[in-house]
Image (spheres, rainbow, N blue to C red):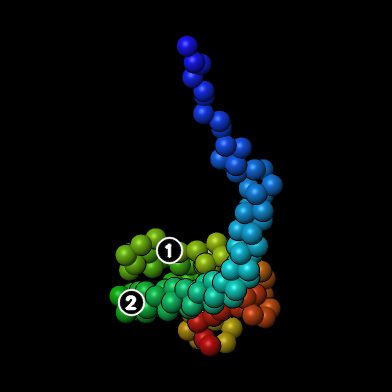
Amino acid sequence: MKKQQQPRRNRRAGITLIEMLVVITIIALFSAIAYQRLTPALEQGRVTAARTQIESLMSALQRYNIENGRFPTQEQGLDAVRPFLTKDIPLDPWGTPYIYRYPGEYSSDPELISYGADGQEGGEEANADINSWQ
């Protein structure tokens, strides 16, 4: 009686650790390149979102003025316009509250300010202030 031969296992059937590390390294490099190219677009999107939110909040302030004959005081802040918004008062795209000034430094109207990515007054590019009067 003949002994049945067992099929040989192919030694190349799987992926080696080195092959896996090479693939992961290539994916990481592509991800880093894509991130560097997308970061400016993401920051520009945040700036656009901040401007849009400021415009919306300024509209709510105008509606408050029409209803009450005055703008909210500095002490009342933006919380006073909450009934004129469909959602809660948003934080700026960098996660900090908008700064409300009334009367404003640059006009007699209220002013809204986001200090941008760095959260500090002044700055350039993504760190530049975004405000309601410019």
Q: Left or right? Give the position of 60 relative to 4.
A: left
Q: Amino acid at mark 2?
A: Arg
Residue lying furthest front? 1
Which residue in the protein does label 1 denote? 89
Question: Label 1: how many residues lie within 10 Å, few (<14), some (14-19) or many (20+)?
Answer: some
| Element type at mark 2 | helix
Residue at the image point whose x is 56% and y is 72% from the top: 38
| Element type at mark 1 | loop
Residue at the image point whose x is 45% and y is 67% from the top: 78
Q: Nearer the viewer, residue 18 or 53?
A: 18
Answer yes or no: do the residues labelled 1 and 2 have beta carbons within 8 Å?
no
Q: Position of residue 40 (x, y in %)?
A: 59, 75
Q: Position of residue 74 (x, y in %)?
A: 52, 70
Residue at the image point whose x is 65% and y is 75% from the top: 127
Ranked by sequence position, the earlier of labels 1 and 2 is 2
Which of labels 1 and 2 is toward the front?
1
Question: Label 2: how many residues lie within 10 Å, few (<14), some (14-19) or many (20+)?
Answer: some
Q: Nearer the viewer, residue 30 or 53?
A: 30
Instruction: Tell me, for residue 25, which label it has, or none.
Output: none
- Above or below, 124 against 4 in this view is below
Q: Position of residue 85 (x, y in %)?
A: 34, 67
Q: Nearer the viewer, residue 70 or 125?
A: 125
Q: Position of residue 114 (x, y in %)?
A: 56, 73
Q: Does residue 89 appear anywhere in the picture? A: yes
Count of labels in the image = 2
Q: Nearer the viewer, residue 55 or 99?
A: 55
The CA span between labels 1 and 2 is: 15 Å
- Above or below, 57 against 12 in this view is below
Q: Which image quadrant is residue 37 in?
A: bottom right
Q: Amino acid at mark 1?
A: Ile
Residue lying furthest top? 1
Which residue in the protein does label 2 denote? 63
